[in-house]
Amino acid sequence: MIDRRNLLKYSLLGAAAAPFGGLANPAFAADSKVVVSEAIRLGMYASLYVAADKGLFAKHGLDAEVSTAGGIALPVPILLSGRGQIGVTSPGMSVNATREGGKVKNIAKIVGGVSMWGMTRPDSKIKTIEDLRGKTIATFKFPSSTIQVPTYAMKTIGKFDPKEAGVTFLELPPGAQAAAVKDGRADIATAFEWDISIGAEQFGLVPALSFADVLGPLCFTTAMATEEFIASNPATVQGFCNAIAEAQKMMHQSNAVFTDVAEKFFPKVSPSVVASATKNFFGSKTAIPKNPTISAEEWERAMQLEQGGGAVSTTLPYAQMVENSFATKATKEFGLA
């Protein structure tokens, strides 16, 4: 039987090989054209959108296209197939790919903490991780962080196994979690912004748990590239990190930058929801990083989360998986220390 982790592994290998009939990856051209493949379109990926909207990619020499892959496991196969040059997703996906021979390194921090909340009906008794025992949690579909994060929190903070404690994950398409809580199919939903503020505005739900507060700082989402691309295109990688560092600096100097760009990139999200989410994002010390560097401690904590949540079977070390020199240089020149 193929379990979820093996299914992910085979999907990675198949997607990487298919466009080229299983042949080795083609060499990347050393130019400034770059496709940035993000997992899905999320408010917490704001560093990408500010860099694009404010002309920072162009300023730093890149002809960059931000393209949405459609799932957390999909950016890495896009990199391995040569259809994209930089991926933005969970760092665990780079570990899974590297263990299968993909040779991927993480080059920048895009989200610096678990920017996720648990939302409930106002009359809910759920206030702590311990209260999740026996509950149904509405989530995105596996291997989404909306499953991994509460699983990890229950095992490490709550000290109990979700399955043994009668916890059920109700896996739904993006945007359907709040309705499931409202109509009683689920007791709580784990979600990102904008879903948290939409859940409050449209369904009368409240954020009951902040996983950022529970778990602390880590590299929750990273930008990554193949070792081949990094070696062949160091100027492009540096330009990307420069743009991200400057975007993060701009947002922390003025949160209105985030609000303005979010309204452009998410035109269907109401201004009131964007305003609410802006407060949530910058009320956290970790969600939107002040700079793109990835520390060894942040990597280790991310790996504990990824393994505890079931995204990776075994972890790989910081020295093997992180190329921090580009982000460090960018931070010195364009970011906030």
Image (cartoon, grey):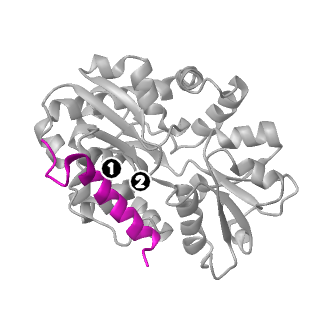
Q: Secondary structure at mark 1?
A: helix
Residue at figure coordinates x 13%, y 32% from the top left: 29
Residue at the extreme bottom of the image, as rendered? 164
Task: Report the quarter where the C terminus lies.
Answer: top left
- Above or below, 122 relative to 50: below
* Magenta range: 1-26
Q: Nearer the viewer, residue 148 or 323?
A: 148
Residue at figure coordinates x 35%, y 39% from the top left: 292
Measure the C-alpha gap from mark 1 to mark 2. Answer: 7 Å
> Measured from the top left, where is residue 2 in percent x and y?
42, 74
Does the magenta run of residues contain 152? no
Total marks shown come to 2
- Above or below, 260 relative to 308: above
The residue at which mark 1 appears reads as 76
Q: Main secondary structure of the magenta part?
A: helix
* Residue 253 visible, this angle: yes
Q: Nearer the viewer, residue 274 or 36?
A: 36
The residue at which mark 2 appears reads as 73
> Measured from the top left, where is residue 234 in percent x and y?
15, 35
Q: Is residue 55 left or right of residue 279?
A: left
Task: Report the quarter where the N terminus lies.
Answer: bottom left
Amino acid type, label 2: Ala
Mark 2 surroundings: few (<14), some (14-19) or many (≥20) residues within 10 A: many
Amino acid type, label 1: Val
Does the magenta run of residues contain 13? yes
Q: Secondary structure at mark 2?
A: loop
Find residue 177 and name its label.
none
Q: Quadrant of residue 53?
A: top left
